[in-house]
Amino acid sequence: MSTRRITRLAGLGAAIAATALVLAGCASSNPLAAPTSSGSSDTIVVGSQAYYSNEIIAEIYAQALEGAGFTVQRQFNIGQRDAYLPSLENGSVTVFPEYTGNLLQYYDKTATETSPDAVYAALQKALPANLTVLDQSTATDQDSYTVTQAFADQYGLNTIADLSKVTVPLTLGGPPELAQRPYGPTGLKSTYGIDVGFKATGDTTVEDLVAGNVNVADVFTADPKIATDHLKSLSDPKGLILASNVVPLVSKNIADKIAPTINKVSAALTPAGLVALNVQSTVDQKSAADIAKQWLQQNNLP
């Protein structure tokens, strides 16, 4: 997990910390062994990270499964991969929204794939024998080269390659470590032939982009500020940046049963749609349950 993702999680403040404390005992135990939890292998246990966007997706999975007639138990705000993957591997959690590229690198630190389909294929091979992934979504939560919509309109920018059309000097903003990352300035030059300066912007990356202190920035594709601050993530046809599409990680023994339901969710979840869900959480302050219910109704899903 990147340092910026950790910062976003920390920004949620005491509310998540309190929730995590309440759920800590549940998250660290096997719900299938406790009479007061699922108590049945027919129960689908849906988990989530301690991250609002991930919880929303998990709640969508949970409500969709309930609508399809499954019994569902929720174990949300478990923590990060080191905390929740053991629960998936031992079967105490059976469904979890994940991100393809980051999950691949967790299980195979030597993986070199970056494009969405190649990452998805490699991930299927890297998973433990009792886990699998269902269909990946087009929605992502990953680093991206992002510009303001006004800047994109001015120069006709849709892809990273289009930055070659820009007639003013380019300055890339992002966390300090981006300067040395393979998808930073050096990678941009070697992959796309584009020269950029670099400015370490840290937690004020979006603010610096909007203010014009930088004209390109490394922003996560699911950041709600993409909508609220009128930004545009540029597509990456050459796979410079590791693809991290939203993907359901599930116990293999239930995959066939739940695939018809969960794959419909993945098909309906788009990049812009995920950003909009996150806006409802961070700006409108709606609960994950209410956001999920509305989204499922709008997409005619159970």
Image: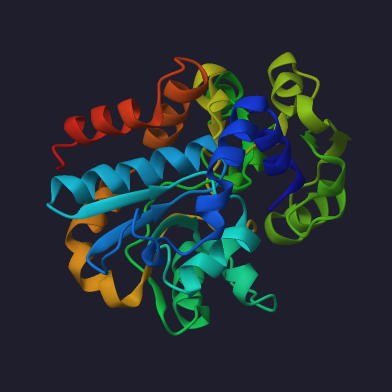
42 or 185, nearer to the observer: 42
172 or 298, nearer to the observer: 298
Q: Is 189 positioned to the left or the right of 278 in the image? A: right
Name which residue lies at 36% across and 71% down: 251
Q: Where residue 140 appears, x then y in whole percent?
A: 48, 48
Name which residue lies at 14% across and 43% down: 302
Colour basis: rainbow
281 or 101, nearer to the observer: 281
Residue closest to the far front: 35
Q: Where residue 283 appears, x then y in whole percent?
A: 50, 16
Residue 24 in sight in this render: yes
Q: Is 249 positioned to the left or the right of 176 in the image? A: left
Q: Quadrant of residue 43?
A: bottom left
Name which residue lies at 46% across and 64% down: 30
Name which residue lies at 31% across and 26% down: 290
Please determine whether, in this image, residue 129 is positioned above or below residue 60: below
Please determine whether, in this image, residue 15 is positioned above or below residue 4: above
Q: Quadrant of residue 4?
A: top right
Q: How many marks?
A: 0
Q: Is 82 positioned to the left or the right of 271 in the image? A: right
Residue 270 in sight in this render: no
Please determine whether, in this image, residue 277 is positioned above or below residue 125: above
217 or 282, nearer to the observer: 282
Q: Where residue 10 appears, x then y in whole percent?
A: 71, 34
Q: Where residue 239 appears, x then y in whole percent?
A: 58, 61
